[in-house]
Image: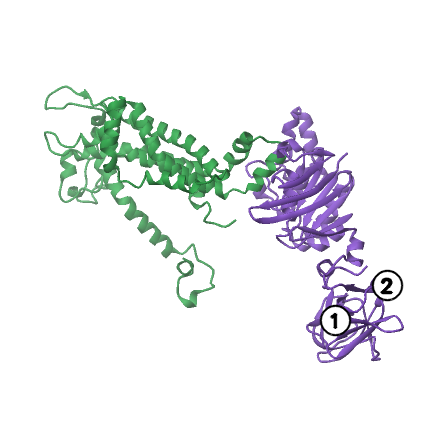
């Protein structure tokens, strides 16, 4: 790490790190571009008509730049795919129908949001308990909690399905929200515990001496200090839940279907895979994640560097 | 009345005894320092008074009230922590106001109190900042201000100045002393810095391995250390402790033999009732007079190393005994390596410790 920062060569050692060099910036830009490329392709495809989406060579740009670029490399952007996400005709000549995607987007947001919130509330309190009130066997409990994440989901899917059938939770919001919350809980507890562990117990003792009850120590002193941690945990949980496919496929009903499941059912059809339509769904699907990450980026940065930088 | 009393307090963690049978009284308006090396149980003692640890045995009384079973928040004690323990999410002003939330004051009155302590400790300009945005010295002052904003039963300080640089430490010492003088509360300060203890305390309690070795005024612990540990712990440079065999001659002098040499001194009055035997002689580095005559009351030593300390020079010199003798000489007395020095100890400043370590009294 250190050698990487100072350039690695012996002669370079001790020289201040040059963070403004154009080479550095260009390299960072190149790597970022590589990461962004698939997303870029999706977004471009979302604005293409079906034939343009399938065209070889690939049509890269939405304009010919006043004739600078051969027409075979350019396409005419259209918003048709985005309209089709929400309503389209399912066979030639038929009237456009509601595809239900408005509902599926709502489901995804509602289910991810609620389950992550639930996991955060339970997990934060549990993590504080684990961190501050050490009981005999705490390490064992923490390990047991973690083991629930060790099994591949495919292994537990059948028992979970049976349980959902018997309890009548299959296809309901409650069912899938509880499942996702349970899914996120181990991660939330472990992560939040590490944040609480970082806090100075002196600060809490000080608050006690200043007359605070245990509740007030938790809410007024500890919680404000781990807000960054909560934000980071929430984003990780949201992304995990947002992308979850397997359980959603088997445990959600028509009413509670989430976008990944609905998207998979959009593949296929009379004219083959409708890449433009899929890309449009994906583009829309990306927006909430980007928004959340964008608004929480400062907290997120503090969250992921928490504990790695010695104060 | 604001007092602190410990009655045979013992604290055990598993099989480890951190504090053993400690008795301590701090009177109203008195400042007592708990002094000792790291891990001697002084902070544990402080935490038991605060209610953050529960004593295994004995009683903790604050203001005459037995508080063993009281929760910390019920004790009404103000404590300044080593790392200040400021509330990171609150501004300095909110930090200062925090201890007042129990009293449920009107906002105007609360702000008035905050303003008052902030002025007293020169914090007016940082009230709106957060703890991580202010300087180390200011954090220290916020911690003190937060402690004195209410009218607690007593004050506890845990290594209050250990994080400050030397210059700041000196000025904060004065400042804390000044603040405490106006308050007539019992105050207990934990420190491992003897200078801090000597300058701030009315009385000093010296602890080692959970046990109190001596309680006394700064003057007492320096001039009449109860045992060899206290003698070596208090005072810089450290007191010379020399293992010798003691004998008496018919004239009432004491003869201390070491190696092949001997040192004849007027018997320190404290050692009058000691007979023959192995003792430890304690002589402070400043209790020697340099002399050229080589009488039998003079220690002969060869200079090995000199450390200029500014106004004075610390000389490490080798005698026939094991180990070096530390001598402080005035700056203008030039000392060269290898030079032979005649050192005459002042009998009145010479301490004799029995083989048990206890001072001969």
Characterize the local packing of mark 1: few (<14), some (14-19) or many (20 or more) Cα atoms within 10 angstroms: many
Q: Chain of mark 2?
A: B
A57 in relation to B152, above or below: below
Q: Nearer the viewer, residue A74 or B311?
A: B311
Output the letter for the chain in green. Answer: A
Task: Report the disc number at residue A198.
Answer: none
Name the secondary structure under disc 2.
helix
Name the secondary structure under disc 1.
strand
Q: Are marks 2 and 1 on the same chain?
A: yes
For the question of whether residue B242 can be seen, the reply is: yes
A200 in relation to A176, above or below: below
Q: Could you say where residue B139 lies in the image, as x and y percent from the top left? A: 63, 44
Which residue appears at 64% of the width and 32% of the height? B99
Seen as rendered, the residue at the extreme right is B251
Which residue does the numbered mark 2 point to in the structure image?
A: B269
Q: Could you say where residue B215 lies in the image, as x and y percent from the top left? A: 75, 50
Which residue does the numbered mark 1 point to in the structure image?
A: B244
Q: Chain of mark 1?
A: B
Q: Nearer the viewer, residue A151 or B269?
A: B269
């Amino acid at each position: 790490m250190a050698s990487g920062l100072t350039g690695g060569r012996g002669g370079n050692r001790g020289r201040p790190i040059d963070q403004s060099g154009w080479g550095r910036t260009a390299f960072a830009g190149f790597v970022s571009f590589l990461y962004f490329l698939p997303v870029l392709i999706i977004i471009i495809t979302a604005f293409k008509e079906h034939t343009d989406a399938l065209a070889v060579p690939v049509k890269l740009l939405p304009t010919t730049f006043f004739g600078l670029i051969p027409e075979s490399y350019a396409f005419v952007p259209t918003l048709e795919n985005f309209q089709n996400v929400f309503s389209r005709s399912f066979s030639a000549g038929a009237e456009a129908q509601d595809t239900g995607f408005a509902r599926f987007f709502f489901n995804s947001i509602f289910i991810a949001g609620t389950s992550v919130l639930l996991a955060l509330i339970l997990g934060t309190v549990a993590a504080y308990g684990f961190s501050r009130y050490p009981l005999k066997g705490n390490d064992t409990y923490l390990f047991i909690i973690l083991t629930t994440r060790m099994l591949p989901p495919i292994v537990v899917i059948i028992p979970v399905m049976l349980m959902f059938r018997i309890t009548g939770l299959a296809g309901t919001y409650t069912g899938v929200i509880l499942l996702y919350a349970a899914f996120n809980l181990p991660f939330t507890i472990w992560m939040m515990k590490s944040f609480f562990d970082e806090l100075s117990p002196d600060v809490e003792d000080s608050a006690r001496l200043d007359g605070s009850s245990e509740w007030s120590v938790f809410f007024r002193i500890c919680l404000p200090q781990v807000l960054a941690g909560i934000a980071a945990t929430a984003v990780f949980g949201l992304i995990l839940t947002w992308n979850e496919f397997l359980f959603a496929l088997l445990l959600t009903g028509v009413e509670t279907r989430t976008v990944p499941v609905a998207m998979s059912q959009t593949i296929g059809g009379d004219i083959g895979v409708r890449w433009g339509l899929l890309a449009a769904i994906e583009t829309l699907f990306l927006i909430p994640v980007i928004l959340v990450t964008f608004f929480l980026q400062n907290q997120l940065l503090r969250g992921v560097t928490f504990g790695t930088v010695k104060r | 009345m604001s007092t602190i009393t410990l009655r045979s307090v013992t604290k055990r963690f598993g099989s480890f005894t951190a504090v053993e049978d400690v008795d301590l009284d701090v009177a109203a308006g008195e400042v007592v320092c708990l002094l000792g090396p790291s891990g001697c149980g002084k902070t544990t003692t402080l935490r038991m008074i605060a209610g953050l640890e529960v004593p295994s045995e004995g009683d903790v009384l604050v203001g005459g009230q037995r508080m063993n079973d009281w929760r910390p928040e019920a004790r009404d004690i103000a404590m300044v922590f080593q790392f200040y323990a400021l509330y990171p999410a609150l501004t300095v002003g909110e930090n200062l106001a925090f201890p007042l939330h129990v009293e449920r004051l009107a906002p105007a009155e609360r702000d008035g109190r905050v303003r008052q302590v902030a002025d007293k400790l020169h914090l007016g300009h940082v009230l709106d900042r957060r703890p991580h945005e202010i300087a180390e010295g200011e954090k220290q002052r916020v911690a003190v201000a937060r402690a004195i904003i209410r009218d607690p039963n007593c004050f506890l300080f845990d290594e209050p100045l250990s994080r400050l640089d030397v210059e700041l430490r000196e000025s904060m010492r004065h400042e804390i002393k000044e603040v405490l003088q106006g308050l007539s509360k019992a105050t207990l300060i934990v420190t491992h810095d003897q200078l801090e203890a000597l300058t701030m305390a009315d009385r000093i309690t010296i602890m080692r391995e959970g046990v109190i070795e001596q309680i006394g005024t700064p003057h007492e612990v320096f001039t009449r250390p109860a045992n060899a540990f206290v003698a070596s712990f208090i005072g810089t440079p450290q007191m010379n402790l020399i293992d010798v065999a003691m004998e008496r001659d018919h004239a009432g002098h004491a003869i201390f033999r070491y190696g092949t040499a001997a040192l004849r001194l007027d018997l320190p009055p404290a050692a009058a009732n000691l007979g023959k035997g192995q003792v430890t002689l304690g002589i402070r580095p400043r209790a020697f007079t340099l002399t050229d005559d080589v009488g039998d009351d003079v220690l002969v030593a060869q200079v090995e190393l000199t450390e200029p300390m500014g106004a004075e020079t610390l000389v490490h010199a080798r005698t026939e005994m094991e180990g070096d003798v530390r001598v402080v000489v005035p700056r203008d007395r030039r000392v060269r390596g290898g030079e032979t020095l005649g050192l005459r100890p002042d009998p009145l400043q010479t301490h004799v410790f029995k083989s048990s370590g206890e001072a001969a009294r």
